[in-house]
């Protein structure tokens, strides 16, 4: 689970979610109009709201941020392509130096020129301990970054870090704007200036973000001139507003997306993802901290039924952060549904059924709370199904909904139905999730997982560019999660989007957990073209 993805969810309050003013009160044809608006405007409904729009604090670290660009970007097939750099980097034979030549003639949306000093400023500011960037450890390999003239940037690494080029999709901030203010709380965090295809024109917290096409965009001014993202946390409300015409598109859970199947004016897009749902099993709880309980839950849960019933087939069972169809998945770590085996594990560990069927050991009842995010039907359904499966093994799980403001202070001891996942290198979706030194660091390592073998393997995996050694390291991580699962991974979820069929050029990428501003068919909204309906 990345800190940014959960913090983004934390910012979306229930009151903001239910606000219908994002588009419903707009005049037809206005900047926030829905399907009745002009061809050159679009309004989409998203579930999560960012906490900040500053790249220095983590926004746009995975690329494709609409307001900003990185040195590189991912194409539709998730291959790296040049963005602010004019080519892929030149890498030294020892893997310690990456040299980028920058694209010329690029300006920020305020008209000031982009140069190498902006790149240096961005990376050095992120690495500054005074900057509140929860993903700083993702740049642990970076020793120094310097400008060579105005058009070349050289990165020097401490150790060969195989996926470093993928880290340079990180959004670049303008030094002339961001350097003159408090990096953590200054106006740049909510009123950004970038080189990207869109300019932020307004941000009503809890309601919407409004954008206009950047006429100075180096890739050409987008044909969708006005673009609005309505923040609608509740799945049912999002579907209702799409049906009523307030929205041109929205992300929806499978059961709600199915309701638009026969709507000929709309199309459904499915995006494969690394997005998983998992249950944290906090080390500091006397029930969830017990390895026997963790192992029993890991095989008591019926993952395939969750995929079939909750996701309606739009996903697959999850046994860890790595999807089963990834080249990095450790074959043989799949766990079959085995209720009898779960009961045997608990019996042998001394957890004996009480009169009501709930197990007890040394006077401790096998019971714990499980929190899920209010309004998130998928999380609620996963939580209820997990609790039902656990009860069959004699474990009593009390599910509760709440906002992140309520849940976060309880994460050290209370279980949470969480989400996470990041495409690409296995370091991306495992280090922040499992590294013991990150326990208690915001939404990193939410379960306070502490496994020496995993810690060593995570370090080994990120400190070499030898493919065989890296495979061995991440294989170790996944096999350790079988022995001591600090999380119960449930499903990997395909994202479904329903969009008005008014444009051409729509597609999807392989997506992370954070499926808000830069995901879905609008990952490339700057290339959409209105359909000719004459």
Image: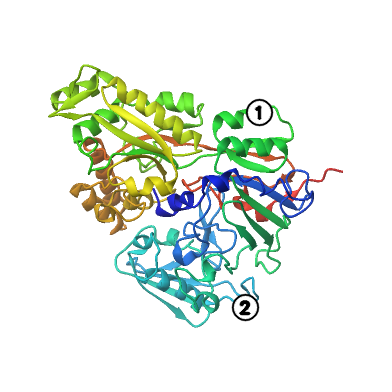
Q: Nearer the viewer, residue 42 or 282?
A: 282
Q: Is residue 325 visible?
A: no
Estimate the x, y position of residue 517 in percent, counting from the top left.
56, 52
Residue 322 quadrant: top left
Identity of the residue drawn at 39% across and 48% down: 1
Residue 439 horizontal/vertical position (percent) = 28, 52
Q: Quadrant of the C terminus?
A: top right
For the residue carrying disc 1, how many other residues have a C-alpha within 10 Å: few (<14), some (14-19), or many (20+)?
Answer: few
Which residue occupies 45% across, 30% down?
381
Q: What is the basis of the colouring in this image?
A: rainbow
The residue most toward the bottom is 149
- Residue situated furthest top in the rendering: 355
- Element class at badge 2: loop
Mark 2 surroundings: few (<14), some (14-19) or many (≥20) residues within 10 A = few
Rendered image: mark on residue 112: 2
Q: Which type of secondary structure does the marked residue at label 1 adopt?
A: loop
Query: How many dots with numbers?
Result: 2
Is residue 510 shown above or below 254? below
Q: CA distance from mark 2 to mark 1?
A: 47 Å
* Residue 105: x %, y % from top left: 63, 75
Nearer to me, 389 or 107: 389
For image coordinates 65% across by 35% down, the residue present is 240
Q: Measured from the top left, where is residue 29 in percent x and y? A: 79, 51
Residue 180 to residue 460: above or below: below
Q: Earlier in the sequence, mark 2 or mark 1?
A: 2
Q: Which mark is residue 466?
A: none
The residue that label 1 is drawn on is: 261
Residue 22 versus residue 498 in the image, above or below? below
Q: Nearer the viewer, residue 407 or 168?
A: 407
């Amino acid at each position: 689970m990345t800190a940014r993805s959960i913090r983004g969810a934390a910012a979306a309050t229930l009151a903001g979610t239910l606000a219908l003013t994002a588009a419903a009160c707009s005049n037809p044809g206005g900047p926030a109009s829905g399907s009745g608006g002009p061809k050159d405007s679009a309004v989409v409904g998203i579930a999560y709201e960012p906490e900040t729009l500053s790249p220095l604090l983590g926004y746009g670290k995975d690329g494709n941020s609409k307001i900003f660009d990185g040195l590189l970007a991912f194409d539709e097939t998730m291959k790296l392509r040049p963005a602010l750099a004019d080519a892929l980097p030149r890498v030294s034979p020892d893997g310690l130096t990456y040299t980028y030549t920058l694209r010329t003639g690029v300006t920020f949306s305020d008209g000031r020129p982009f140069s190498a000093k902006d790149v240096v400023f961005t990376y050095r500011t992120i690495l500054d301990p005074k900057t509140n960037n929860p993903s700083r450890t993702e740049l642990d390999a970076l020793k120094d970054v310097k400008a060579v003239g105005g058009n070349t940037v050289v990165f020097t690494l401490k150790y060969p870090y195989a996926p470093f080029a993928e880290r340079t999709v990180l959004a670049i901030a303008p030094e002339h704007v961001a350097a003159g203010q408090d990096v953590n709380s200054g106006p740049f965090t909510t009123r950004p200036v970038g080189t990207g295809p869109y300019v932020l024109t307004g941000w009503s917290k809890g309601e919407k973000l409004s954008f206009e096409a950047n006429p100075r965009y180096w890739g050409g001014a987008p044909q969708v001139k006005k673009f609005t993202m309505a923040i609608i946390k509740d799945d049912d409300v999002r579907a209702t507003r799409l049906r009523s015409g307030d929205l041109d598109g929205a992300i929806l859970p499978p059961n709600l997306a199915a309701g638009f199947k026969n709507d000929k004016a709309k199309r459904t897009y499915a995006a494969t993802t690394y997005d998983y749902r998992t249950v944290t099993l906090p080390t500091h709880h006397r029930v969830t901290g017990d390895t026997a309980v963790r192992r029993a839950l890991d095989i008591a849960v019926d993952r395939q039924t969750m995929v079939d019933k909750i996701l309606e087939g739009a996903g697959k069972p999850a046994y860890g952060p790595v999807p089963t169809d990834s080249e990095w998945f450790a074959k043989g770590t799949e766990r079959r549904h085995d209720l009898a085996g779960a009961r045997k594990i608990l019996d042998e560990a001394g957890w004996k059924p009480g009169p009501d069927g709930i197990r007890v050991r040394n006077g401790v009842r096998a019971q714990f709370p499980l929190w899920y995010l209010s309004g998130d039907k998928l999380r609620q359904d996963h939580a209820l199904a997990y609790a039902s499966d656990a009860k069959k093994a004699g474990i009593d799980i009390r599910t509760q909904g709440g906002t992140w403001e309520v849940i976060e202070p309880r994460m050290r001891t209370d279980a949470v139905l969480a989400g996470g996942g990041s495409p690409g290198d296995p370091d991306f979706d495992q280090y922040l999730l499992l590294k013991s030194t990150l326990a208690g660091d915001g939404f990193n390592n939410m379960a306070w997982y502490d496994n020496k073998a995993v810690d060593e393997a995570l370090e080994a995996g990120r400190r070499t560019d030898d493919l065989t050694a890296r495979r061995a390291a991440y294989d170790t991580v996944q096999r350790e999660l079988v022995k001591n699962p600090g999380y119960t991974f449930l499903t990997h979820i395909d994202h479904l989007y329903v969009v008005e069929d008014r444009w051409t050029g729509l597609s999807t990428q392989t997506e992370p957990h954070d499926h808000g501003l830069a995901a879905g068919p609008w990952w490339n909204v700057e290339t959409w073209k209105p359909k000719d309906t004459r």
